[in-house]
Image (spheres, rainbow, N blue to C red):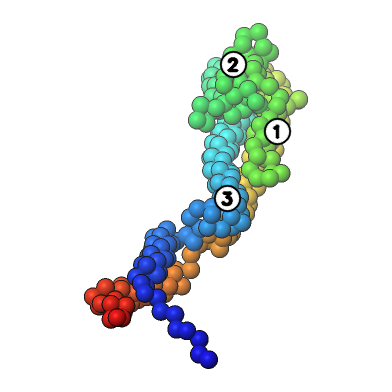
Amino acid sequence: MMGSLRVNPNPAPQLLENLQSLQQQQNQALAELSSGLAVSQPSDNPAATAAYIENRAAAGATDQYQQSSSMLQNQLSVADASLNTVVQTLSQAISLATEGANGTMSASQRQALATQTANLQQQVLQAANQTYQGVYLFGGTASTAPPYVLNATSPSGVQYAGNNNSNSVQLGPGQNVQVNLPGSQIFNTSGADVFQALHDLTAALNANSASAIQAAGAEVQSAFQAVTTQRTFYGATQQRLQSLDTFLSTESVQLSQQAATLAGANLAQVATQLSQNQVASQATMNAESKLLSQPNLFSYLP
C-alpha cells in the first residue's frame, strides 16, 4: 500500500525563511570582507574572542615598551653627548696644564690660562646639569632640579645636590633596564673629582707654581679617565636597548600574525560563499515570484 502524498499547501513562508537565512549569511560575509575579521563579537567564537583579547593586550604592552625604549635611547644619546663634551673639555684642561707647567711661562701668561680653565669648569657645570624633556640627567633619581650648584663654601666651588640612586624602567616581563648613573658616580669619583681638579688647576695657575700646576694636571688626568670609564655605561645601555628593540619588533609581528589567525577572515573563502549565497538568494526569490503568480494548487480541487 502506497503512503499518502503530503503536499505543502503554502510553501511561501518556508521560502521566505530560507531567503532571510541567506540574507543573514550575506550580511555576515559582507561584514567580514569589510573588516577582515571573522570574529566581530564575543558570541561569534567565545574561545577565539578570549584569546584575541589577550593577544591585543600583549600587543598593546609591546607597543608601549617600544615607545619607552625609543624615548630612553634619545635620553641616553643626550647624556652621552654631554659626557663627550666633558671629556673634550677635560682634554683641553690637560693641554693647558701641560702648557702652564712649562718653566718659561710668565705669571701673566699663567693667569691667562687660569681664566681659560675657570671657563672650562663652567662648561663642565653646564654639561653636568644637562636636561632631556625637562628632566635632569645626572641627579640620580632627583630629576626636577639642577644636580650641581655653585657654592663658595665647597672646596671646589661646586656642590652636588642630587642623590646616589639610579632610575630603572621596565621594558618587558622581567626586563628592567637601568637608564642613568648618578652624577656623584661620574663627576665626583674619589681621587678624581672633576670640579675639584679644575678648581685646583685654576688655583695653581693663578699661584704661578709649576709644581702645583703639575700636580693639578695629574688630578685632571685622573678625572678624565674616570669620566671616560663611566661614560661606557651609556653606550652599553644603548646597545642593550637596540637589541631589545629587535626582540620587541619581532614579537610585535608575531602577535599581529597570531591576531590574524585568531580573528582574521579567509577573504577568498568568504568571497566565494558570498557569491554562492547571492545565487541561492536570487533562485529563491525567483521561485517565490513564480509561486505567487500562480493559482494555489488546492484551488483546482473540487
* Quadrant of image for the C terminus: bottom left
| Residue drawn at point x = 45 percent, y = 84 percent | 5
Residue 178 location, x and y as percent? 68, 37
Q: Secondary structure at mark 3?
A: helix
**Marks 3 and 1, how far apart at CA:** 50 Å
Image check: 215 left or right of 49?
right
Going from the N terminus, do you reach mark 3 or mark 2 first?
A: 3
- Extreme top residue here? 153
Marks 3, 1: nearer the viewer: 3
Kindly indicate the quadrant of the structure image that contains residue 181: top right
Residue 144 location, x and y as percent? 57, 21
- Between residue 86 and residue 281, name the one nearer to us: 281
- Between residue 73 and residue 121, name the one nearer to us: 73
Residue corresponding to mark 2 = 149
**Circle 3/circle 2 CB separation < 8 Å:** no
Q: Amino acid at mark 3?
A: Ile
Q: Amino acid at mark 1?
A: Ala
Going from the N terminus, do you reach mark 2 or mark 1 first?
A: 2
Q: How many marks can you see? A: 3
Does 51 sit above or below residue 111?
below
Residue corresponding to mark 1 = 226
**Marks 2 and 1, how far apart at CA:** 21 Å
**Marks 3 and 2, how far apart at CA:** 51 Å
